[in-house]
Image (cartoon, rainbow, N blue to C red):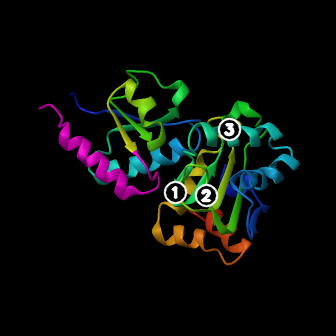
Amino acid sequence: MELKDLLKYENVEIIDSVKDWRDAVAIATRKLVEQGYIEPRYTDAIIESAIEHNAYFVLCPGVALLHASSDKGVNETQLSITYVKEPFRFEGKDEDVNLMITLAAADGESHMQAIQQVAIVLGDDETLNKALNPESVDDLYNLFTEAQV
Amino acid sequence: MGKVKKVLCVCQAGLGSSLILGMNVEKVLEAMGKGDIRVEHTSIGDTTAGQADLYIAGGDIYEQVKVFGPCVAIHNLVNKNEIREVLEKYFEENPDEE
């Protein structure tokens, strides 16, 4: 499945700020909980994982790939993208984060193509820069869903 | 040290970070003329010794992964330059046996 099949336009958000990183994780996962893709405990699992493993899912300065294991309350594979204008930091990390890509993977396979598209965007300086400075939700949505593996 | 035929990228959940790391490692190896090396990804919980000739871990779990075998750490998982530097250094220090 391509990213456009696993990322709803309404689940791409640009917000001004978060209270702290826990608030950020709650906001980033909120819609997926409301829509039934994940259980509320998946949000808790991401927070626990961040504490236990020093937010290893910060992939590069600016970007966090929020995720936990499939068995922590994932009902169906889905992604969301949340851009926070005011950067924040995870506990123990010295990189600012603006962009959160939330991955709820129900199994090891169904999200692979979608994540490859995410990696294409983040792996190129020009597109990474666009992802970290989006002008609109359209910008973000198109940037990621149009990426070619 | 034998020839590296398989590398295993490891992250906590084995779903996201290691997959992205694995894709980038594949591209870097190809660019280094080592495209025949197999690249796979998994979670730390599913990692055992003997699964690969080289383990590649996100910086934060390096200490946990290195017990399984030869291991390098990558900090910026999308930075192909860092990946290339680390791998070049590894292959330089551990040349294939003739």
Location of mark 2 (residue): A89
Compared across the picture, whether B49 is left or right of A141 comes to left
Location of mark 3 (residue): A48
Residue at image point 68% right, 54% down:
A21
Residue type, label 1: Asp
Percent coordinates x, y for residue A78 in the rendering? 73, 48
Judged from this view, the residue extending furthest toward the left is B98
Between disc 2 and disc 1, whose residue precedes? 2
Percent coordinates x, y for residue A134 in the rendering? 64, 74
Q: Which residues are magenta?
A: B74-98
Residue at image point 72% right, 56% down:
A24
Q: CA distance from mark 2 to mark 1?
A: 7 Å
Judged from this view, the residue extending furthest toward the bottom is A135
In which chain is the residue bearing label 2?
Answer: A
In which chain is the residue bearing label 1?
Answer: A
**Labelled pair 2, 1 in contact (Cβ < 8 Å):** yes
Residue type, label 3: Glu
Residue type, label 2: Arg
Q: CA distance from mark 3 to mark 2?
A: 16 Å
Q: Nearer the viewer, mark 1 or mark 3?
A: 1
Total residue callouts: 3
Local secondary structure at mark 3: helix
Local secondary structure at mark 1: loop
Q: Is A14 contained in the magenta span?
A: no
Q: Is B85 contained in the magenta span?
A: yes
State the mark number for residue A94. 1
